[in-house]
Amino acid sequence: MPTYNYICHDCRRVVRLFFTYAEYDTAVPVCPHCQSKKLRRKIGRVAVAKSEDARMDSMMDDSALAGLDENDPRSLGQFMRKMSQEMGEDLGDEFNEVVDRLERGESPESIEQSMPELAEGMGGPDMGGMGDFDDF
Ligand SMILES: [Zn+2]
């Protein structure tokens, strides 16, 4: 049975109560020490995994971005490779091909033309929307 920890506002004790999940929806916790109903859920220390967004943000702050030259395919390719490594995901053959070709110095326009399905995702010079990478 799940255990819920509360702090009693009246007697300041930490109260441990047991509810089934069904009960928890409707149950009114009552302090077993002073019968107060002024109990507040005590949320335990939770290890919060860095969310996808936070990870993106930290990448955006990364100095690698400062070194990114959007007009230099190699720089762009290295940046995209780093992005995919940071995300820890295999973004697929098409993504890898684009990165490879960028790193060889091929222009994004040229790659776009040979891979028309990517044209939308590449989005021209405005690579600002990182969501675009999802389209690969
Ligand atoms: Zn109490």
Image (cartoon, rainbow, N blue to C red):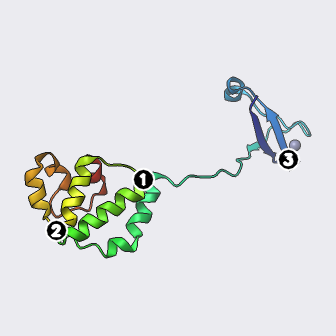
Residue 71: image quadrant is: bottom left
Q: Position of residue 61 (x, y in %)?
A: 41, 69
Residue type, label 2? Gly
Residue 65, above or below 116: below
Question: Ligand 1 shows up in which quadrant of the image?
Answer: top right
Q: Is residue 136 visible?
A: no
Whole-angstrom CA distance, mark 1 to mark 3, is: 49 Å
> Split into 4 quadrants, where in the image is the N terminus?
top right
Mark 3 lies on residue:
10
82 vs 33, nearest the viewer: 82
Measure how far apart labels 2 and 3 are at the Cα level: 69 Å
Q: Which mark is residue 105?
A: 2
Distance from the alpha carbon under mark 2 to that under mark 1: 24 Å
Q: What residue is rendered at 72% in x and 25% in y?
A: 23
Q: Amino acid at mark 1?
A: Gly
For the residues bearing labels 2 and 3, Cβ distance under 8 angstroms: no
Circle 1 sits in a helix, a strand or a loop, which is it? loop
Closest to the camera, between mark 1 and mark 3, is 1
Asked if the residue at label 3 sits under 8 Å from ligand 1, the reply is yes
For disc 1, the marked residue is: 88
